[in-house]
Image (cartoon, rainbow, N blue to C red):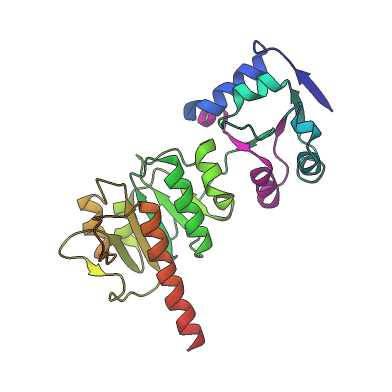
Amino acid sequence: MSRTILSRENPDFRHWKKLLHSARERRKAGLLVLEGVHLVRDWHTAYGAPESVLVSDRGMENAEIRACLAESCVGAKMVRLAEARFAELATTATPAGILALAPLPTRGSSPAPDRDSLLLDGIQDPGNLGTLLRTAAAAGIGQVLLSADCADVWSPKTLRAGQGAHFCLDIHAGADLVAFLRNFQGEGLATALTERAESLYAIQWRHPVAWVFGAEGQGVRPEILTAARKQVRIPMPGRMESLNVSAAAAICLFEMTRRAETTRTA
């Protein structure tokens, strides 16, 4: 059964607005916000129906949204919002017409020390963070650790950039990257522009691999570089000094994929 909300003074509407725009409120409520059909469907595939679904008047006229409601939101509380109220909630210039609230996934166990992993140090742009998660999932990396000063991994913008990658990864936010690397049962490879760094195309590694990437400008912090033991650079014969961290990660992770594919077909 659905209900319609027209007023911005409605207490539920005010609560939803806080959830969309405040990481603190999301953590307090234990909820994340899914914007758009794609994320709602991906959530359903991984975890089942969300808790609540908010749909705009215009969204109710959209065939794709109606199909999503019928297929991926059975059992969820549904609320219909006046178009103006929905636009106040949406974090995009063109509202998707559907939002869903779902419980924050929990990780009961510590990160595994014997899995290929992605370690992110101080990545503060939500778009970059989501893209990094999407790249990791595409390259077959199953575990991601984030330092405490990374952007909110469950923010609406990060979720949109991740395109569903969050739901097929083991994500550990606020992780101690140094401690993890010291106990890692494989190879730690940190990207860096130092004299010690070896070319990505020449360096050898053994699995599992923990790939470490840092924020633009600052890069990977010295103590994490030390814990990783090996440093990697991407050869850049052109006139640029560095790459966007998302581009750098894609190059490194798919070089790993290329080598694995070459080994299998040799």
**What residue do we see at 41% from left, 39% from top?**
151
Residue 217 relative to residue 77: left or right:
left
Residue 210 relative to residue 235: left or right:
right
**What residue do we see at 39% from left, 43% from top?**
174
**What residue do we see at 53% from left, 61% from top?**
138
Q: Can residue 112 be spotted in the picture?
A: yes
Q: Position of residue 251 (x, y in %)?
A: 39, 64
Q: What's drawn in magenta, residue-wise?
A: 26-54
Q: Position of residue 195 (x, y in %)?
A: 15, 64
In the image, 65 versus 203, the foreground residue is 65
In the image, 179 versus 49, the foreground residue is 49
- Look at the picture and state if 220 lies above or below 65: below
Residue 107 relative to residue 55: left or right:
left
- Look at the picture and state if 3 lies above or below 178: above
Q: Position of residue 222 (x, y in %)?
A: 20, 52
Taking the view exactly as shown, the residue that stands out farthest to the front is 239
Taking the view exactly as shown, the residue that stands out farthest to the bottom is 266
Q: Is 74 a magenta residue?
A: no
In the image, 201 versus 240, the foreground residue is 240
In the picture, the quarter occupied by the N terminus is top right
Instruction: Tally the numbered discs.
Output: 0
Q: Position of residue 113 (x, y in %)?
A: 40, 62
Residue 150 relative to residue 92: left or right:
left
- Look at the picture and state if 104 lies above or below 110: above
Q: Is 46 a magenta residue?
A: yes
**What residue do we see at 80% from left, 46% from top?**
71
Taking the view exactly as shown, the residue that stands out farthest to the top is 9
